[in-house]
Image: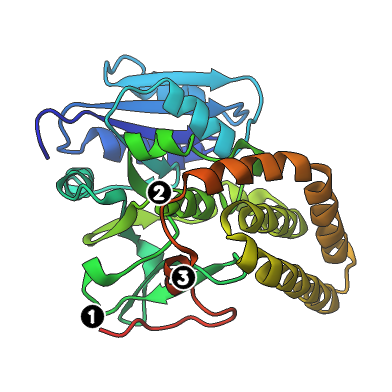
Amino acid sequence: MGNDCSVSVIVLNYNGDDFAINCIDSILASDLSEFELVLFDNGSTDGSLESVKRRHGADPRIKILVSPTNLGFAAGNNAAAEHSKGDVLVFLNNDTIVAKGDLTTLVGTLISDPDAGIALPITSEGHRDNRIYIGGVDLLGRPSLLDITGVPPDSVRTFAAGPAFAVRRAAWESVRGFDPKYFVYMEDIDLAWRIGLLGFHVKIVPTVTIVHRGGATTSRIPKAQRVYFRFRNQTRTLIKNFSLGDLLVLGPTSLLYSFFEAIYLTSVSKSTEFLKSWSRALGWNLRFLRDTLITREQVQRSRRVQERAVREIMTFPGICPRLKS
């Protein structure tokens, strides 16, 4: 990493318990130079903010920002980024732990490739059955998995970021960061997709594996509520980011798939909450359709990548493909 590059590591905390302390401990033990740690507390009530202040409040590398209420993952991270100064932004969930050289390698890989907008490490849950997976997105806008075992990293294309990633500030600012309407879920796919439409790509860094405990905060959200956020944000993502032709075909298909998924979840759980989640998600998108269309116009006006190239990055619905080497 060049000495002229500064880095802001951003951690969003919401009732993170000991996860937040362990995450911050690992960041401060990093060999990364010229960095600031921006901790944005999203209205925590579990004492985790006070614990961080007692342990690291005097460290000049830490900037602590506090919101009296929970702004959500997207808006909270946006607020933190506005108060950061780095040329590169590193976003870490508060339930991640980095090794000493992880951040240096991650940032250095991003800086060394001018075409990369995002540098994406492997997370611990990406190692399964002696194979390596990263996040992706299917043609219906749903999260998927890509098996990249044995595949040259530079040949991998994806629209996802996940619980840990570095992003070039120029790319971040070009797309105005996370969509604050998302609150939680799908915001990383939407961000990576919009950055990808500008011509940047996601750079995979297989030499870095970051520990991710998974769901330390979101697991506390009832499943029906999580499904609601995924359904509604998935629809907004497609409307904003697809070309008109693909949107007219794949948009209704996505809605139909999510409806059948809601029926399946209702059948398995014997609860109507999942059908209600689908209905609420549809209602939310109708209510905010004008805002979504205005945002879509901005996205489509600035895009530099043709839709065929976008489709090639996506997986088929319901399939977890292994990329050919």
Name above or below for residue 48 compared with residue 313. above
Q: Is residue 101 left or right of residue 195?
A: left
How far separated are the C-alphas under marks 3 and 2? 14 Å
Q: Classify the position of the N terminus by image quarter.
A: top left
Q: Earlier in the sequence, mark 3 or mark 1?
A: 1
Q: Badge 2: how crowded within 10 Å, few (<14), some, or many (20+)? A: some
Q: Nearer the viewer, residue 140 or 86?
A: 140
Identify the residue shown where x is 68% and y is 72%: 249
Tag 3 residue: 308
Name above or below for residue 38 compared with residue 305. above
Q: Badge 1: how crowded within 10 Å, few (<14), some, or many (20+)? A: few
Name above or below for residue 255 compared with residue 45. below
The picture places residue 152, in percent across and down from the top left corner, at 21, 74
Identify the residue shown where x is 51% and y is 55%: 189
Q: Earlier in the sequence, mark 3 or mark 2?
A: 2
Q: Earlier in the sequence, mark 2 or mark 1?
A: 1
Given the image, on which type of amino acid does mark 2 rest? Leu
The picture places residue 174, in percent across and down from the top left corner, at 42, 36
Q: Nearer the viewer, residue 171 or 208?
A: 171
The picture places residue 175, in percent across and down from the top left corner, at 47, 39
Q: Nearer the viewer, residue 295 or 24?
A: 295
Q: Secondary structure at mark 3?
A: helix
How far separated are the C-alphas under marks 2 and 1? 28 Å
Given the image, on which type of amino acid does mark 1 rest? Gly
Q: Is residue 208 left or right of residue 282?
A: left
Q: Secondary structure at mark 2?
A: loop
Camera-nearest label, 2 or 1:
2
Asked if residue 183 can be seen in this view, the reply is: no
Identify the residue shown where x is 82% and y is 73%: 269
Q: Which mark is residue 198?
A: 2
How far separated are the C-alphas under marks 3 and 1? 26 Å
Tag 1 residue: 150
